[in-house]
Image (tube, helix red, strand yellow):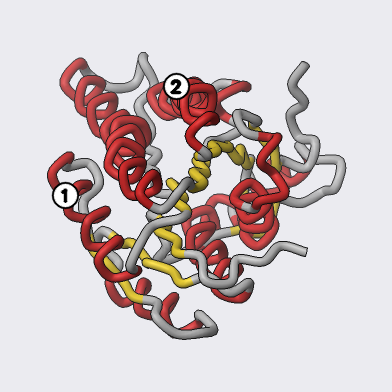
Amino acid sequence: MMDFQGKKVLITGASRGIGRACAVQFAALGAQVAVHFHRQHEAAEATLDRLPGQGHFTIQADIGDPQAVLRLVEGSVQGLGRLDILVNNAGIWRQHPIDGVDYAEWQAAWQEILAVNLLSVANLCHAAVPAMLRGGGGRIVNVSSRGAFRGEPISPAYGASKAALNALSQSLAVHLATKNIYVGVVAPGWVETDMAAETLAGAEGAAIRAQSPLGRVARAEEVASAVCYMAAPESAFSTGAILDVNGASYLRT
């Protein structure tokens, strides 16, 4: 039975989707949550309204900006009192097939996606680790993607960013284990969220659902449950692990 009573959690990209589901589950299990958002202030406030318990708050930052990352972590620690758990959930995806965009668009896509999906996570971890060390340890959970393994043909920077995120997570897991900081990864496939709703409702929806023998995509709450597990004391010996949540739509060997 996972119990996060009194734990202090920062979740990036928590205004909707997987991040919102994570915030709700952590709060329901006793945690106090800093709900990060970039532009979706109203959605973040809607997340806040759904959280049971007291002491939760929203906090804004453009995590693609390294200085904003520092302010985000500092503000979260100040508001929470300390930082026990960091969930790096925020990420972006955009189409940029190599034979379908010009060189300037190609450069822009790689710079933007790597800045948010990879470099921001590295920066958030660097900023959060000292706070965790002061508290005697902590947990970092990074949300990756099935695309890190099966490829992203029309968004190669996204696939590359998530593959690199996996490697970053495992490097940190090895280095931080002796410091009582544990690092895990959750790698979902398609998830039933607002962001995916249009695609899932369109012509591609049936084919996407058919990728899984379960005949559906994941619910955000299922991914959140995996995130909570990787953040729980019970998962300490799973540090460095990558937990797939894709309904057997892609099986790694």
Q: For the view shown, which residue lies furthest in the right direction?
A: 213
Q: Residue at x 25, y 46 (%)?
A: 63
Q: Amino acid at mark 2?
A: Ala
Q: Badge 1: few (under 14), some or many (20 or more) residues near its Cα, within 10 Å?
A: some
Is any part of residue 107 visible from this angle?
yes
Q: For the view shown, which residue lies furthest in the left direction?
A: 67
Residue 177 position within the rendered picture, expressed as x and y whole percent measured from the top left? 54, 30
Q: Amino acid at mark 1?
A: Ala
Location of mark 1 (residue)? 68
241 over 198 or under it: above or below: above
Residue 15 position within the rendered picture, expressed as x and y whole percent measured from the top left? 40, 66
Marks 2/1: CA distance? 22 Å
Q: Residue at x 60, y 41 (%)?
A: 186
Quarter of the image with the C terminus is top right
149 over 235 or under it: above or below: above
Between 94 and 99, the one lying in front of the other is 94
Per the rendering, the mark at residue 164 is 2
Is any part of residue 154 visible from this angle?
no
- Report the side of 82 relative to 231 (left or right): left
Q: Callout 2: helix, strand or loop? A: helix
